[in-house]
Image: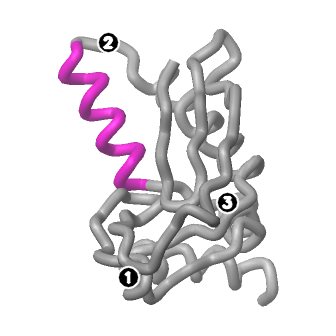
């Protein structure tokens, strides 16, 4: 079981036979203050203080981007490298589960996503893909 903190939401998750299962979601918007330190919700790059975050996307926009083919490439690559370092002989099978689990988290997210410049630019292609 793992706890994942994002700027406005805490997810309690566990890895099950069918992938990552969200056990509990706790909203934290009322606890956030403008001087709280924030990380990109996709790549975890530090963004500085909440009041200085330039790019915030709605959970609906992130879901649309994922439906249109967006994948968190940095997170996936880091996970694959970790599996290889741990001696996993067939990381491709596990990576499929990781991606499906991440998509499940996106689908269930109800809070805005703080994004770094790079993630914002890469996801815009997929958000706008459906409208073009």
Instruction: Work out whether residue 16 or residue 26 is closer to the camera in this orientation and state it.
Output: 26
> Which of labels 2 and 3 is toward the front?
3
Residue at point 43% right, 85% down?
51
Secondary structure state at the residue bearing disc 1: helix
Instruction: Work out whether residue 39 or residue 51 is closer to the camera in this orientation and state it.
Output: 51
Q: CA distance from mark 3 to mark 1?
A: 18 Å
Q: In this rendering, would 81 be left or right of 23? A: left
Please name the residue that numbered disc 3 is placed on.
Answer: 66
Secondary structure state at the residue bearing disc 2: loop
Residue 33 locus on image (x, y percent): 47, 73
Main secondary structure type of the part rendered in magenta: helix
Residue 11 locus on image (x, y percent): 60, 39
> Which of labels 3 and 1 is toward the front?
1
Please name the residue that numbered disc 1 is placed on.
Answer: 117
Quadrant position of the C terminus in the picture: bottom right
Magenta region, residue range: 73-86
Residue 90 locus on image (x, y percent): 39, 16
In terms of sequence position, does the residue under pointer 1 or pointer 2 come before the other?
A: 2
Per the rendering, the mark at residue 73 is none
Q: CA distance from mark 1 to mark 2?
A: 35 Å
Q: Is residue 35 magenta?
A: no
């Amino acid at each position: 079981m793992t706890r994942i903190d994002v700027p406005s939401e805490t997810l309690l998750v566990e890895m099950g036979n069918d992938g990552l299962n969200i056990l509990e979601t706790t909203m934290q918007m009322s606890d956030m203050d403008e001087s709280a330190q924030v990380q990109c919700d996709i790549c975890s790059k530090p963004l500085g203080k909440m009041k200085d975050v330039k790019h915030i996307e709605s959970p609906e926009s992130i879901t649309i981007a994922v439906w249109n083919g967006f994948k968190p490439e940095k997170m996936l690559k880091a996970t694959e490298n970790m599996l290889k370092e741990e001696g996993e002989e067939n990381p491709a099978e596990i990576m499929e589960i990781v991606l499906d689990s991440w998509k499940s988290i996106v689908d269930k997210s109800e809070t805005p996503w703080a994004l770094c410049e790079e993630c914002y630019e890469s996801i815009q292609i997929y958000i706008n893909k459906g409208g073009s």
